[in-house]
Image (spheres, rainbow, N blue to C red):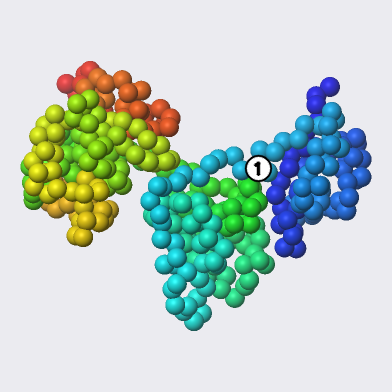
Amino acid sequence: MDRKCITLKNLLIKQKKCIGLKFYTDKVVQALVNDLPDVRWSEEYRMSYIANSPANLNLIFKTFRGVAWINCNFFYARSNFGKETEPVDVQRFGSREPVEGKKLCPESYLRKLELKCYASSTVNTYVSCFEAFLNHYVDRELKDLNENDIRLYLQKLIREHSSNSYVNQAINAIKFYYEVVLEMPNRFYAIERPRAEEKLPQVLAKEEVLSIIENTNNIKHRCIVSLLYSAGLRRGEVLNLKPDDIDSKRMVIKVRSGKGNKDRYTILSEKLVVDLRIYYKEWRPNTFLFEGPGGKRCSPESVACIVREAARKAKIKKKVTPHVLRHSFATHLLENGTDLRYIQVLLGHKSTKTTEIYTHVATNIFFKIKNPLD
């Protein structure tokens, strides 16, 4: 006989946290559920539920021990949140002047973002998306909104032709409130996400990359663009570099607190070492390898501007961003025969699935195929 299973769900019913118990019809399980204290039935969620408390949770495990397997995959948080080593200024959102007829992000939401140490870009996205949601229901209290209201809001975004990426960001921002701020993990297990768009990365030819590097304004800009390409770094990773992270003896670069708060090493170009030594003698950076006015770290916008301006001077018609140089680094390595697993390590990808996208844009495989027209 198959062992019975009960799946626990986080529910919010009449503004009270509850434990939902979902299971296939079974007389034994149903009898035991009926014996739980103050158990009730929710027609909306189609499951029984009891108040969410440590005592009730312990009672559930004790009651069904040896009778049914308790599935907690939808009840407890399953992933850690990425962190940055640099402090994120969340208070700037809390100090904004209120605008009549517009709702601002709750203080509890901002405090949780600060505690989780999300990246600045993530904080901006979450606050913007959550406030858009709040102001869609500007005449209603947040505590009165439920799954149906959220689903209707997402349908509105889709009807307005919002991108799949924006809809997913909106879901993440809303989920953050209910699942992290209200501490109800996996709250919206029934909310469907739009299918991910599988777009191929933009890649430059090696000659185009070299032309961009040659058209930078000065040695500092040249080093920044060269690092983005020759080491496959993200824009933020270049800005986080410190002089000691450049190891010219081992010919590696230490990337601190990359995506997912992970350190890694990547390769250092011999040509770039020469330029970096010239740059260091001329600019004498203190804390960060690349600093702006007042010794502060350069802004992400300034890096994008450097790349864009160099591409314009090089007469590259494609839209060139710092991440395009990272894509080009990975693709050129693959075309030169570098093992995909090594490229994964250099890029800091958690899974080879992410790195495999470059197999779709590497052109060396096409050279082996004879065109039927020829």
How crowded pointer 1 is (Cα within 10 Å; few <14, some 14-19, many 20+) is rated as: some
In x, y percent, where is residue 176? 55, 54
Q: Image height check: is 37 above or below 111?
A: above
In x, y percent, where is residue 118? 45, 51
Q: Image height check: is 158 above or below 5?
A: below
Q: Is residue 19 left or right of residue 329?
A: right
Give amino acid for label 1.
Tyr
Q: Nearer the viewer, residue 314 or 62?
A: 62
Q: Residue at x 51, y 67 (%)?
A: 105
Q: Residue at x 43, y 30 (%)?
A: 351
Q: Nearer the viewer, residue 21 or 286?
A: 286
Residue 234 visible in rendering? yes
Q: Is residue 320 left or right of residue 44?
A: left
Q: Secondary structure at mark 1?
A: loop
> Which quarter of the picture shows residue 344?
top left
Q: Quadrant of the C terminus?
A: top left
Q: Image height check: is 272 above or below 57?
A: above
Q: Which residue is mark 1?
A: 76
Q: Nearer the viewer, residue 247 or 51?
A: 247
In x, y percent, where is residue 37? 89, 50
In x, y percent, where is residue 90? 44, 62
Q: Is residue 74 left or right of residue 177?
A: right
Q: Is residue 14 left or right of residue 298?
A: right
